[in-house]
């Protein structure tokens, strides 16, 4: 990602596109660094090259993904399997 | 040996565990030919202490070498010939034991954790029942890898192109501290060891590491050093990064439970978040990118995943059985407190 002063215009208001992608049944991946504003007004920062933002809201490390969605997905699979079988 | 100021002398050579490792040891000490290696034939167990240690020493020449051993031996044709013979034995044993699997199923299978009723994983056991002594033994054994964490995987970089290369380098950059020496994962592991009262000197616990641990590190070196095994290396990396985040969460909990310090907990806490990201990048961009360029490597990726699962299961099984019998999982003397 490129940021900072533009070499030609000298402007420091250079903004480039940040790539974001979503994994099916998984986290939202955002090119870092990321500052995440929480509902209580506080912020947490991750300066990793890519940050995995939790979308299942069950992560013990929320707002960052800790792979807890795998359990939820499996439970849903198990539940739907039972429904189909009954 | 006269030491060059500012240079680490490398770890001392280990004691041999049979005729093969004795022959390698002799060749390293004397810069001579590795004689007496007939045991590289069918007679020696490819999973055994002797073959795995001999292979480990030969691979170590490509990393940090050993104290008082000529650095040029890394490219000794005689030692490379012996290494090739040992690698063939190990690779044949792996191919004989790893069931052929569909690549997508193998990748998806990594997301499943042991169900109820299945034997607990090593990290599960440590989280529930692990003592401080168990965790110190675990760290001493794992130090053979974690003190060179991500080094074996760096060799694959020139063999990749495009998406797979960019993604592999990004993950490795994170592993190597993202430009900050104090955040190199190997450094974080050294901090963990010191917190647990262990010696974090590179190679310090080679003597105590059993063949099942050597086989785990030898697998990475084997896949990393051979361009022909780049698909297997990618599969191996996908296995490690996918299973690491939940296992790290359990190990962080285990360390908190036994009252370990912040530096010890930090190593695994860092891996919970880091590897949740690495998993996605490795699965979709490293493996996905590689197979887009070279779809014929899918079976090799599946083999890399299966081989890693096999080797890690063997390590876990042996370690757990020793602990459950109330003994030490290390070779030789129990760690001093």
Image (spheres, rainbow, N blue to C red):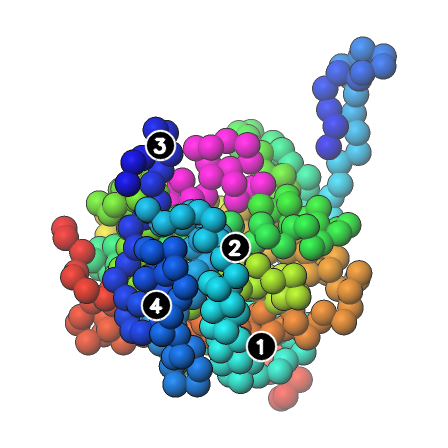
Secondary structure character of the magenta stretch overall:
helix
Q: Residue at x 56, y 54 (%)?
A: B153
Q: Residue at x 27, y 76 (%)?
A: B321
Queried whether the magenta region covers residue B293, the answer comes back as no
Q: Please name which of the two marks, 3 or 1, marks the residue nearer to the observer.
A: 3
Q: Residue furthest top?
A: A10
Q: Tell me the residue that label 4 is attached to.
A: B23
First in sequence: mark 2 vs mark 4: 4
Task: Indicate the position of residue B122 as horizontal and vertical percent values.
Answer: 36, 67
Q: Tell me the residue that label 3 is attached to.
A: B4
Query: Where, quadrant-wise, is the N terminus of chain B in this rendering?
Result: top left
In the picture, measured across the screen, residue A9 lies left or right of residue B227, that is right
What's the magenta region? B173-189
Q: Which mark is residue B75?
A: 2
* Chain where mark 3 sits: B
Q: Residue furthest left?
A: B337
Look at the numbered disc 3 and give the secondary structure of its residue: loop
Look at the numbered disc 2 and give the secondary structure of its residue: helix
Mark 3 and mark 2 on one chain: yes
How far apart are the two marked residues, 3 and 2, measured between alpha carbons? 22 Å
How far apart are the two marked residues, 2 and 4, measured between alpha carbons? 17 Å
How far apart are the two marked residues, 3 and 1, measured between alpha carbons? 62 Å
Callout 2 environment at 10 Å: few (<14), some (14 to 19), or many (20+)? few
* Chain where mark 4 sits: B
Task: Indicate the position of residue B70 as horizontal and vertical percent values.
Answer: 40, 48
How far apart are the two marked residues, 1 and 2, measured between alpha carbons? 54 Å
Look at the numbered disc 1 and give the secondary structure of its residue: helix
Callout 1 environment at 10 Å: few (<14), some (14 to 19), or many (20+)? few
């Amino acid at each position: 990602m490129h940021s900072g002063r533009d070499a030609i215009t000298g402007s420091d208001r250079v903004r480039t596109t940040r790539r974001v992608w979503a994994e099916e049944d998984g986290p939202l991946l955002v090119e870092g660094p990321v500052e995440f504003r929480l509902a209580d007004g506080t912020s947490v920062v991750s300066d990793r090259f890519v940050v995995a933002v939790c979308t299942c809201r069950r992560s013990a490390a929320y707002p960052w993904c800790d792979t807890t969605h795998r359990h939820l997905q499996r439970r849903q699979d198990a539940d739907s399997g039972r429904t189909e079988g009954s | 040996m006269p030491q060059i100021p500012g240079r680490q002398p490398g770890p001392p050579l280990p004691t041999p565990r049979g005729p093969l490792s004795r022959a390698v040891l002799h060749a390293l000490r004397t810069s001579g030919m590795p004689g007496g290696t007939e045991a590289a034939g069918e007679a020696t167990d490819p999973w055994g202490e002797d073959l795995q240690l001999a292979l480990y020493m030969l691979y170590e020449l490509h990393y940090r070498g050993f104290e008082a051993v000529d650095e040029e031996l890394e490219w000794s044709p005689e030692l490379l010939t012996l290494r090739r013979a040992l690698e063939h034995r190990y690779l044949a044993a792996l191919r004989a034991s790893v069931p052929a699997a569909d690549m997508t199923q193998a990748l998806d299978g990594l997301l499943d954790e042991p169900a109820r009723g299945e034997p607990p994983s090593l990290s599960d056991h440590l989280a529930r029942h692990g003592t401080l002594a168990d965790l110190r033994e675990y760290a001493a054994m794992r130090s053979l890898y974690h003190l060179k964490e991500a080094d074996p995987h760096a060799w694959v970089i020139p063999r990749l192109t495009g998406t797979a290369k960019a993604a592999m380098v990004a993950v490795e950059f994170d592993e190597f501290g993202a430009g900050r020496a104090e955040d190199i994962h190997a450094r974080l592991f050294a901090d963990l060891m010191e917190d647990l009262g262990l010696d974090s000197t590179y190679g310090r616990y080679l003597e105590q590491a059993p063949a099942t641990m050597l086989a785990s590190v030898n697998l990475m070196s084997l896949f990393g050093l051979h361009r022909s095994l780049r698909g297997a290396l990618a599969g191996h990396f996908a296995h490690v990064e996918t299973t690491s985040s939940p296992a790290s969460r359990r190990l962080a909990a285990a360390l908190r439970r036994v009252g370990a310090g912040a530096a010890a907990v930090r190593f695994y806490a860092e891996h919970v978040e880091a590897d949740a990201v690495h998993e996605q990048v490795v699965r979709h961009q490293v493996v996905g990118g590689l197979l887009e360029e070279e779809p014929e490597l899918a079976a090799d990726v599946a083999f890399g995943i299966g081989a890693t699962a096999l080797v890690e299961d063997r390590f876990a099984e042996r370690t757990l059985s020793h602990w459950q019998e109330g003994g030490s999982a290390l070779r030789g003397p129990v760690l001093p407190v």
